[in-house]
Amino acid sequence: MSLGVELHCRCIKTESRRIRFIEKVELIPPNPHCDKLEVIATLRKSGRQVCLDPEALWVKEIIDKITNSTQ
Amino acid sequence: MSLGVELHCRCIKTESRRIRFIEKVELIPPNPHCDKLEVIATLRKSGRQVCLDPEALWVKEIIDKITNSTQ
């Protein structure tokens, strides 16, 4: 029996295509349950949650754009 | 009766002091219900949600740090 912590990441795979109509983005840093950063977008209208690739340039751009969309 | 859309922002006020032990951060861009960017942190252990000031430098630093914490 391995004594390692059983990891429970929320994202199994990430969406590579650029998505639009994002209602919100959740940033979940690595933690005891999941050893990698997870970025989860919630889509407007459908409310569907989509895992984004934290390494993808367009994801970083979206996070930047949102963070600087103060008005 | 004003025909303006009634705004429902989730954040009434924001926490100015630097907070730690963040489990996740939600970025909610301006939308029809709320005309400003909202940044909401969920704290580890308590699960309490705290609104952060999107303009504060330490908040931008935390978002950067999380976004670049891929491993």
Image (cartoon, coloured by chain):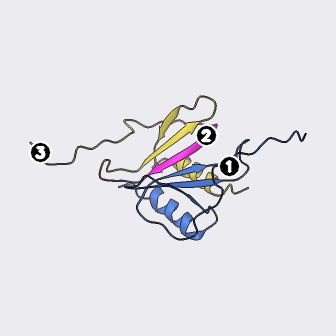
Chain colours: A blue, B yellow
Q: In this view, does A29 lie to the left or right of A25?
A: right
Q: Is residue B64 left or right of residue B69?
A: left
Look at the image and tell me whether residue B39 can be seen. Answer: yes
Rounded to the nearest whole Å, what is the CA distance between mark 3 and mark 2?
40 Å
Looking at the rendered structure, the kind of residue marked 1 is Cys
* Quadrant into which the C terminus of chain B falls: bottom right
Quarter assignment of residue A60: bottom right
Residue A12: x and y in percent read 66, 56
Residue found at the far right of this picture: A1
Q: Residue B32 carries which label?
A: none
Q: What element carries label 2?
A: strand
CB within 8 Å, label 1 to label 2: no
Q: How would you rate the neighbour count of disc 3 (Cα within 10 Å): few for under 14, some for 14-19, many for 20 or more?
A: few
Reading the image, the residue beneath label 1 is A9
CB within 8 Å, label 3 to label 1: no
Q: Nearer the viewer, residue B16 or B23?
A: B23
Residue found at the far top of this picture: B46
Please state the extent of the stretch shown in magenta in the rendering. Answer: B15-32
Looking at the rendered structure, the kind of residue marked 2 is Ile
Residue drawn at x 55%, y 54% is A40
Reading the image, the residue beneath label 3 is B2
Q: Residue B22 carries which label?
A: 2
Q: Is residue B28 left or right of residue A37?
A: left
Say above or below: B8 vs A52. above
Q: What element carries label 3?
A: loop
Q: Is residue A27 left or right of residue B38?
A: right
Residue A22: x and y in percent read 43, 58
